[in-house]
Each structure stands twice: as structure tokens, then as C-alpha cells.
């Protein structure tokens, strides 16, 4: 076992296949740890981590916080809504003030793409990107791949379709990078308006017919329509979206094979996916959440091991 | 680099039988006792002792697990090379059990210190004992001593004790290596 090639996790774009393998191998160990009667190891007891959330989050924030606590790190939380950011403080000032209180690592979610990269160039701490605008969400992509690996044995050679709002989705972009890095075949599926131009350059195919996409795939990753990021109307109505791109039991049952359904959450039940599909045996949505803690523990542990005393 | 043989296959075999008998003396039927091999190198010794107890001494079942101590070590971020984790496999609760830690070489005692913390994640044992094949008795950093001991060795710090098993190196042999 080596160490990561990077000092920050800013995006899947910046890491190697070896890094991904190392993170997964380490996550295997942590998955065993979090199923013990006492789910905690003392490795990071001298590390302090600040969770800076400039954008709302439930799952990711809880998952990071649990991962940090299960590694025995000290954790401070910060959310933009209740902070001096509202008073006009800049990002670098905010973070440097926090770091002067001896914080070793920063987990940050920010609405602006590239915020993590920017921060890593200006402050002296290990940065983990927990989502930067519509750019990347690396830990989500890692836990998605980890869940595929757990369910299907490996990621290499598998057919994965990402369905929904590709344009506004950092999960989609990070997933594309991660899946391609591991040798999976990737298609994206959704309304033309929600598929970025030139996405083929990333080595993915575009499919606008959901049934065809599902017939092709081993895994379907259903994304939410991100209404909060939409300034204009991208499709005529939610009802029309559901009819063309919503996954329901009838459609799933009419396929000539079994596929695995994933969703990064939060689910809009009845829109991209119906309740009976989300709660069926095909869905590994809650496994993804559990794996999220193990994968984030691995990422934090491996990055922390590079912070020398 | 020079190396000399501390124990050959036959001597190891005799010692394993003695250690097994000493365990039986204290633990009889092993109903309340579990063996825990310390990763990465203690697991071979633990499995050998388990096999001996079950096959040669006809003890019905000796529960044996593997404990990895990587995440409990006290040199995280202090050592130059990254720490490599191994699999922990403990399929039983150790609550109120008599636990026997098994490792091949007892050197500074720091691994066992870590193991004492790590095992608490699986419950509160009634007692914990330590069995080692080789005890480097003058090299301890912590007040930890074995309860069952194969051979005491007086080695200086520049010397290395290496235990080879058929399972991992194709032979049963213990070397003293001077680098």
C-alpha cells in the first residue's frame, strides 16, 4: 500500500487509478470498522477538521462528520447562513481565520466551481472538495463506484448510464471521470437541453431514449432535476419529464435483464424515480449512503497521513 | 548482511506443542477462550496453534480471529513509510471471554499496546493473555511481557528477527539477521 499522489481531494480529474484503488482498499477496512460494536478508531485524534458548508447539504455533511468522528478527529462545523460571510468576508479570510485556530484539514462545499482548487492554492491545509457548484463532487463519485464494485464485483467493463440533469450535476461529472478512469463504459441520458454540449469529448455517449439506455446498461444512476440551479425552463413540464425520463416499476419490469439502480439523493419521489423502484431490491441507494461513510473515512485517513508533524 | 538460524523446523514444532500444552493447562476446553492472531505476521502462528489444539489435542472448537492494529498505532504520521492496513476478522464477541493474543515476535511492545486498545471495539474481555514465539526481552519500550513464550532472544537493535512459515515463505524457520 502506498500513499495518495495528491495532498488534496479537489476532484476525480486530479487523481489516478492507483489512488482510487488505494481509497477502495482502505475503505474495505473501514467498512469492517463501522460494523463493529464500537465503530471508532483513534487514528486521527490529533487532527482537527473544519467542515465549511457554503451551500445546503444533509447527507454529505452528516456523512463527512460521521467519518471524521469515527476516525477520532476533532470537528468544527460552519455553515454560511450563520456566519460572517454574510457580513462581506472573503473566502480566503474566512478560511485563514479558521486555520489560525490550528485546523489541519478543510472539507468544503461551495456554490462556485473551482472554489476548492482556489482555496488549495492560497491556504495551508489539506482540502477535500465536498461539491463545488456544477463542477465536481469527488467523494460521491468514489462511493458510487465503490458501491458498484461491491454489488457487481468490479467497475471495469461495466455499462453505466447516468440519467437526468447532467448539465447542472457535479455528481454526473465526477462520476464520468471516475467511471472512465476505472474502465467502465458510460452513457448519459436526459433531455437534450440538460446535456452539456461537447460532452462526447469526455468519452461518453449520449442517449435520449431512456428505454434504450436501460436495455444497454448494468447500472443506472438516476439524478435529480436541480430546479434550484435552473434560471430558465429546460423542459416543458415536470409531467412531461416524468413520462420520458422517469423510472417506474413497469419500465423496469419490461426490461429483458436485471439492472442495478443508484441515486445520490435527495430523491424527488415520483419524478426521476418512483417510490416502488427506489424501495425495491434493485436499488442500492441506502448501501451507497453506508458506503459513503467508509469511503470518506478512507479519503480523510489517507490525506491526513500525508500531513507531516 | 549475515544471518543465523535461531530455530529450525523441528525446534519450532516442539515449541508449538509445548505452547499448545501450556494453553490447555490454563484454558482446558477453550469454551470461554478465543485466540486472536495479530496482523500481519501473528496470524500464521495463531492458526498453527489452533490446528494443533483441534487436531492433535482433540479440542472441539478453538475460536480464532485476526486483529489488525493499523488504525490504533501510535506512530501514525510519524513514520516515513505509509502504514499498511490488513484485514480484521473477528466473527465473535469478546465480551467476558478470555482472549489470548498471538504474535510471532515481541519486540518493543507497541503493537501489543495497540492491540489492547483495538480489541475493546469487540467488547470487554474477561482477561487478555499474550503468547509469542520469540521474545526479544531487552528491547521493550513499554511494560508488556508475554504469558506464553517460545524462545527468549537477546538481540541488539540493529539485528532483526524474522519468522518464516511454510504458509508465507515456504519453510518453518526463525532467523537472526544482521544488516
Image (cartoon, rainbow, N blue to C red):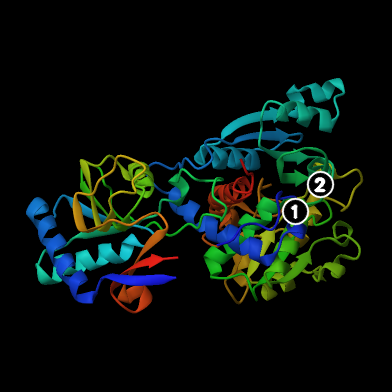
Tell me the residue at 66%/32% (across/down): A103
Q: Nearer the viewer, residue A236 or A68?
A: A68
In the figure, residue A145 lies in which quadrant? bottom right
Question: Label 1, label 2: how many angstroms apart (C-alpha)?
Answer: 9 Å
- Discs 1/2, front: 2
| Kind of element beneath mark 1 | loop
Query: Residue A45 at x, y = what percent?
Result: 52, 36
Left or right, residue A236 beside residue A39: right
Question: On screen, A30 above or below B168?
Answer: above
Residue farthest along the bottom direction in this orientation = B170
Tell me the residue at 11%/71% (across/down): B56
Q: Earlier in the sequence, mark 1 or mark 2?
A: 1
In the figure, residue A215 lies in which quadrant? bottom right
Q: Are marks 1 and 2 on the same chain?
A: yes
Q: Which residue is mark 2?
A: A117
Q: The numbered mark 1 sits on a residue in which chain?
A: A
Query: Residue A162 at x, y = what percent?
Result: 73, 62
Question: On screen, A204 above or below A83?
Answer: below
Q: Nearer the viewer, residue B1 or A219?
A: B1
Left or right, residue B170 beside residue A68: left
Is there CB contact under 8 Å for labels 1 and 2?
yes
Q: Which residue is mark 1?
A: A11
Q: Nearer the viewer, residue A3 or B13?
A: B13
Query: Residue A63 at x, y = what percent?
Result: 59, 42
Amino acid at each position: 500500500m502506498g500513499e495518495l499522489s495528491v495532498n488534496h481531494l479537489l476532484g476525480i480529474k486530479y487523481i489516478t487509478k492507483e489512488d482510487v484503488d488505494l481509497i477502495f482498499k482502505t475503505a474495505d477496512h473501514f467498512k469492517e470498522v463501522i460494523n463493529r460494536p464500537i465503530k471508532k478508531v483513534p487514528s486521527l485524534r490529533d487532527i482537527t477538521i473544519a467542515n465549511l458548508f457554503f451551500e445546503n447539504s444533509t447527507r454529505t455533511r452528516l456523512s463527512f462528520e460521521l467519518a471524521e468522528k469515527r476516525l477520532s478527529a476533532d470537528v468544527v462545523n460552519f455553515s454560511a447562513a450563520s456566519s460572517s460571510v454574510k457580513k462581506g468576508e472573503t473566502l480566503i479570510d474566512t478560511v485563514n481565520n479558521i486555520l489560525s485556530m490550528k485546523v489541519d484539514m478543510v472539507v468544503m462545499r461551495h456554490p462556485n466551481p473551482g472554489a476548492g482548487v482556489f482555496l488549495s492554492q492560497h491556504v495551508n491545509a489539506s482540502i477535500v472538495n465536498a461539491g463545488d457548484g456544477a463542477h465536481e463532487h469527488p467523494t460521491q463519485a468514489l462511493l458510487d463506484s465503490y458501491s458498484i464494485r461491491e454489488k457487481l464485483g468490479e467497475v471495469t467493463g461495466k455499462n453505466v448510464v447516468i440519467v437526468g440533469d447532467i448539465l447542472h450535476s457535479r455528481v454526473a461529472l465526477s462520476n464520468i471521470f471516475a467511471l472512465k478512469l476505472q474502465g467502465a463504459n458510460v452513457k448519459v441520458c436526459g433531455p437534450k437541453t440538460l446535456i452539456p454540449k461537447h460532452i462526447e469529448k469526455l468519452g461518453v455517449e449520449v442517449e435520449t431514449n431512456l428505454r434504450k439506455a436501460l436495455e444497454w446498461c448494468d447500472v443506472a444512476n438516476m439524478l435529480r432535476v436541480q430546479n434550484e440551479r435552473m434560471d430558465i425552463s429546460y423542459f416543458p413540464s415536470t409531467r412531461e419529464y416524468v413520462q420520458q425520463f422517469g423510472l417506474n416499476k413497469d419500465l423496469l419490469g419490461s426490461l429483458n435483464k436485471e439492472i442495478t439502480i443508484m441515486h445520490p439523493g435527495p430523491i424527488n419521489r415520483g419524478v426521476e424515480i418512483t417510490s416502488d423502484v427506489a424501495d425495491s431490491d434493485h436499488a442500492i441507494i441506502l448501501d451507497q449512503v453506508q458506503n459513503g461513510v467508509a469511503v470518506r473515512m478512507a479519503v480523510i485517513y489517507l490525506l491526513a497521513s500525508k500531513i507531516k508533524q | 548482511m549475515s544471518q543465523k538460524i535461531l530455530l529450525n523446523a523441528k525446534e519450532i514444532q516442539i515449541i508449538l506443542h509445548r505452547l499448545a500444552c501450556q494453553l490447555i493447562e490454563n484454558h482446558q476446553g477453550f469454551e470461554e477462550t478465543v485466540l486472536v492472531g495479530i496482523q500481519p505476521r501473528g496470524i500464521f502462528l495463531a492458526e498453527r496453534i489452533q490446528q494443533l489444539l483441534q487436531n492433535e489435542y482433540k479440542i472441539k472448537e478453538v475460536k480464532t480471529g485476526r486483529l489488525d492494529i493499523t488504525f490504533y498505532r501510535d506512530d501514525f504520521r510519524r513514520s516515513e513509510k505509509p502504514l499498511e492496513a490488513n484485514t480484521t476478522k473477528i466473527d465473535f464477541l469478546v465480551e467476558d471471554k478470555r482472549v489470548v493474543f498471538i504474535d510471532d515476535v515481541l519486540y518493543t511492545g507497541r503493537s501489543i499496546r495497540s492491540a489492547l486498545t483495538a480489541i475493546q471495539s469487540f467488547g470487554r474481555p474477561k482477561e487478555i493473555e499474550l503468547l509469542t514465539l520469540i521474545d526479544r526481552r531487552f528491547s521493550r519500550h513499554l511494560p508488556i511481557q508475554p504469558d506464553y513464550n517460545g524462545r527468549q532472544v537477546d538481540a541488539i537493535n540493529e539485528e532483526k528477527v524474522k519468522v518464516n512459515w511454510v504458509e508465507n515463505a515456504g519453510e518453518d524457520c526463525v532467523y537472526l539477521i544482521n544488516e
